[in-house]
Image (cartoon, rainbow, N blue to C red):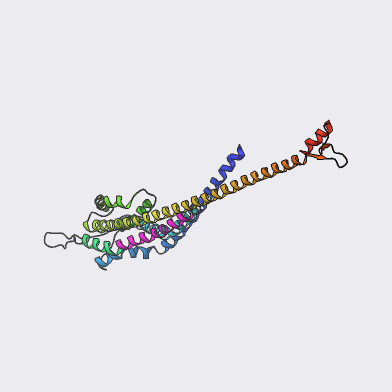
């Protein structure tokens, strides 16, 4: 009983050990990249601040109001950059753990999505950095006013931590929304959604897209529209990908049905051949029985009366009527 339970637990323990090793490598890669990113943290933060610095000009500044604000901001920047840089390592370890348990067709189906996930996230981050952020910063800086007369000047004094939180929120929101084609295509492959169903619910998707954009972006129309429109475009791309996935799945099902029909036909041919062999065997058995009966008739015919070479009285050529003769006759039969 203990041996059986031990045999059943061994594969599970091996999987857990492998999972631990994969997570160890992923976390180790995260820590290494974190150290490297913290070494270049000022350059990374300068890269994130550049869209605002180009609009504000070189004479403006950013402030911090807490002693630890800049330090923790640099830690967040380093961790954010490390997660982005080490994402391929994490995805590779995840794929190495999952791939052995998948069939060949499943591996070929999921492999493109493993590569598409970081690429789409990078596209979302590039969109928000090069297009949305400059437009949004111009909109926010338009509320500045120069002082004169009885009016006081209204001027932006951006805080380091708040600016980083806003930038990370925008990049994460756009990168997450750009995963929509991957998610919907996987759901279409699994049969959870269909292309026709997604097309029928397009009007609801538009409302949800702009509502989602309103929650994740700052309360301005530029950011909301800048995120809502790409979500709708990605939704349309997801419908196209779902149709392609359905066609491939239908083609694969048709090929499987054709293979099953071929196997059925071959089984029928084998059955007919076996039936013919059985008939031939039965015919051979009948022929053998006929030959045995003919041999028996020949044996009886040989037991006819014959005349003796020296006398005229006919006599049987077989044995006498005593017991020994009957035994010999039975043996002869």
Judge from the rendering whether residue 180 lies leftward or rightward of residue 103; answer left or right.
left
In the picture as drawn, the residue positioned furthest to the front comes out as: 312
Q: Report x, y in % for residue 87.
A: 42, 58
Q: Quadrant of the N terminus?
A: top right
Judge from the rendering whether residue 27 lies leftward or rightward of residue 63; answer left or right.
right
Using the image as rendered, state which of residue 187 and residue 250 is in the foreground: 250
In the picture as drawn, the residue positioned furthest to the right comes out as: 310
In the picture as drawn, the residue positioned furthest to the bottom comes out as: 58
Q: Quadrant of the C terminus?
A: top right
> Toward which corner of the image does residue 320 lie, by quadrant?
top right
Q: Report x, y in % for residue 215.
A: 27, 51
Using the image as rendered, state which of residue 23 and residue 319 is in the foreground: 319
In the picture as drawn, the residue positioned furthest to the left comes out as: 149
Camera sees residue 162: no
Using the image as rendered, state which of residue 285 and residue 1 is in the foreground: 285
Residue 254 is a magenta residue: no
Camera sees residue 126: yes
Q: Residue at x 32, y 56 (%)?
A: 238
Using the image as rendered, state which of residue 306 and residue 140 is in the foreground: 306
Q: Residue at x 29, y 65 (%)?
A: 130
Q: Report x, y in % for residue 44.
A: 37, 64
Q: Which residues make up the magenta segment?
A: 100-127
Q: Report x, y in % for residue 200.
A: 27, 50
Give the dominant element type of the magenta stretch: helix, strand or loop. Answer: helix
């Amino acid at each position: 009983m203990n041996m059986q339970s031990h045999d059943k637990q061994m594969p599970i323990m091996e999987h857990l050990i492998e999972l631990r090793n994969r997570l160890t490598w992923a976390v180790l890669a995260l820590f290494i990249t974190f150290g490297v990113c913290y070494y270049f943290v000022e350059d990374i933060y300068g890269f994130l601040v550049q869209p605002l610095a180009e609009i504000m000009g070189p004479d403006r500044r950013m402030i911090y109001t807490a002693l630890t604000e800049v330090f923790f901001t640099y830690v967040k920047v380093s961790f954010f950059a490390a997660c982005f840089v080490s994402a391929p390592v994490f995805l590779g370890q995840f794929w190495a753990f999952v791939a052995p348990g998948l069939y060949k067709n499943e591996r070929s189906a999921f492999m493109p999505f493993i590569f598409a996930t970081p690429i789409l996230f990078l596209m979302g981050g590039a969109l928000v950095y090069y297009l949305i952020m400059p437009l949004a910063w111009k909109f926010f800086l338009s509320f500045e006013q120069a002082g004169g007369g009885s009016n006081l000047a209204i001027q932006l004094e951006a805080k380091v931590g708040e600016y980083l939180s806003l930038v990370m929120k925008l990049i994460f929101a756009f990168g997450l929304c750009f995963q929509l084609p991957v998610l919907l295509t996987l759901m279409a492959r699994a049969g959870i959604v269909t292309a026709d169903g997604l097309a029928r619910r397009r009007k609801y998707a538009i409302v949800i897209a702009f509502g989602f954009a309103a929650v994740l972006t700052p309360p301005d129309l530029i950011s909301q529209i800048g995120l809502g429109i790409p979500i709708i475009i990605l939704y349309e791309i997801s419908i196209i990908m779902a149709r392609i996935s359905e066609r491939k799945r239908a083609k694969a099902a048709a090929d499987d049905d054709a293979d099953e029909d071929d196997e059925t036909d071959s089984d029928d041919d084998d059955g007919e051949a076996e039936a013919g062999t059985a008939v031939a065997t039965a015919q051979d058995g009948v022929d053998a029985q006929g030959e045995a009966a003919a041999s028996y008739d020949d044996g009886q015919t040989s037991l006819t009366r014959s005349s003796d070479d020296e006398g005229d009285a006919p006599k049987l050529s077989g044995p006498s009527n005593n017991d020994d003769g009957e035994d010999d006759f039975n043996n002869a039969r």
